[in-house]
Image (spheres, rainbow, N blue to C red):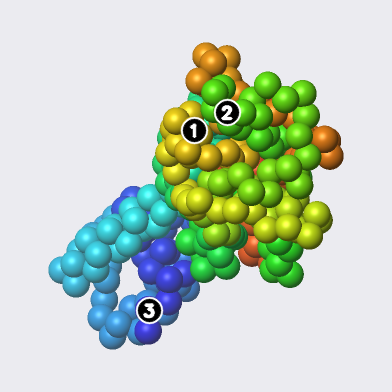
Amino acid sequence: MLNFNQLRAFYYTARHLSCTKAAEQLFITQPAITAQLKALEDSCEMKLFKRKGRRLVLTEEGAAIYEYAKKIFTMEKELEDLIQDMRRLKVGVLRLGTTKTYARYVMPTIIGRFHERFPHLKIQVDEGSSLEMIRSLLDLKNEVVVVAKVEDHPKVAFTPLSSEELVLIVSPEHKIAGEKTISVSELHEQPIIVKERGSGTRKLVYDLFAKQGLQPEVLIETSNTELIKQMVARGDGIAFLVRGAVAAEVEQGTLATVPLKEGPIYLDVSIAHLKDEHLSHAAKAFVDLVMTIPHLF
């Protein structure tokens, strides 16, 4: 078994052909270098140096071992540099999860800011429902996720970011489009298009109806926000989506919103990660950055 302290003493001595210079580079005494060299030679059962006058000369065996030692300590230096670059966020990968809606309407701003600050880091973005993204943390697929908080989990830490308003959207031609307000009970028989299972939006809508002792009359469920908006605009049904996802269509007049008599409803948006897992430098930098960006939603 090689002793790396002995090999290191040999490498620096062979590199400079001087025990004195090796001792200076390793910040130890010359007798300590000499002792390490003798121990290595004894372990290898061969002479690694010869003396020619006052000069050290590598033996054939010593020269062969030096070539391997040079590769080892060159790679050690490269590894040390890599670790330093990781600490300084000059290299690394951020594994990030979010919902399809946030991926389109929110994450470009966050990722853009992050890339400006840490241009050398690679970013891998995974999309799915809020529940799927929480499970991706537990499966160690993602380190950090930005989601609606669907449910608590003992292994997941949630840090609130903001609250998003959910709005009722209808076609401008729909019979309730001109109403000042409408109650949830009045929506009971309206065909409604809902987000997929595991979605924070879907859970909030079902909870809203459940408080009135009702079930929504579901026409279709989908993870595709654009499909929901298109179907609502055609008059196929009504839906609840976050205000930011429909702002452009409402302004253009292709969709209309109707306030609820029960008052506005909000979706809690959080950044989440595993409680007992150490965050990588890239993930920690992302969390710190997100917490400093105002008015994301």
Which quadrant would residue 294 be assigned to in this image?
top right
Which quadrant would residue 109 be assigned to in this image?
top right
Q: Which of the pair 226/152 is nearer the observer? A: 226
- Residue identifier under label 3: 2
- Residue identifier under label 2: 174
Q: Which of the pair 32/204 is nearer the observer? A: 204
Which quadrant would residue 38 be assigned to in this image?
bottom left
179 shown above or below 9: above
How far apart, in angstroms, are the residues tagged by discs 2 and 3? 81 Å
- Residue identifier under label 1: 235
Q: Residue furthest left?
A: 60
Left or right of 165? Residue 100 is left
Instruction: Tell me if mark 1 has few (under 14), some (14-19) or many (20+) residues whose alpha carbon lies within 10 angstroms of its own.
Output: some
**Image point (61%, 28%), residue name:** 175
Identified by mark 3, the residue type is Leu
Disc 2 + disc 1, Cβ < 8 Å: yes
188 shown above or below 53: above
**Image point (40%, 57%), residue name:** 76
**Image point (32%, 62%), residue name:** 72
How far apart, in angstroms, are the residues tagged by discs 2 and 1? 7 Å
